[in-house]
Amino acid sequence: QCTQQKPFICQQFRKH
């Protein structure tokens, strides 16, 4: 789950 909010939690949780 990538969040469009800052900071982007996409880099920490790269589980797609």
Image (cartoon, rainbow, N blue to C red):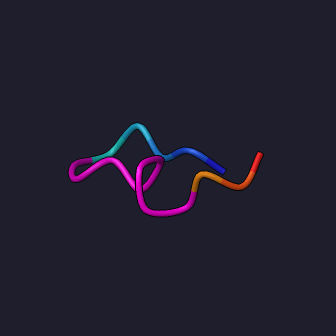
For the point 71% across and 55% down, which residue is it? 15
The answer to which of 12 and 1 lies nearer the viewer is 12
Q: Main secondary structure of the magenta part?
A: loop
Q: Residue at x 22, y 53 (%)?
A: 7
Question: Residue placed farthest to the left in the image?
Answer: 6
Task: Decide if residue 3 is on the left or right side of residue 14.
Answer: left
Location of residue 13 (image quadrant) = bottom right
Image point 59% across, 51% down: which residue? Answer: 14
Magenta extent: 6-13
Report x, y in % for residue 3: 48, 46
Name the residue at 47% across, 47% down. Answer: 10
Quick check: 4 left or right of 16? left
In this view, the residue farthest toward the top is 4
Q: Position of residue 9 (x, y in %)?
A: 41, 56
Q: Position of residue 16 (x, y in %)?
A: 77, 45
| Left or right: residue 8 compared with residue 9 | left
Residue 11: say if magenta.
Answer: yes
Residue farthest bottom in this picture: 12
Residue 2 percent location from the top left of the image: 56, 44
Give whichever of 16, 1 is nearer the camera. Answer: 16
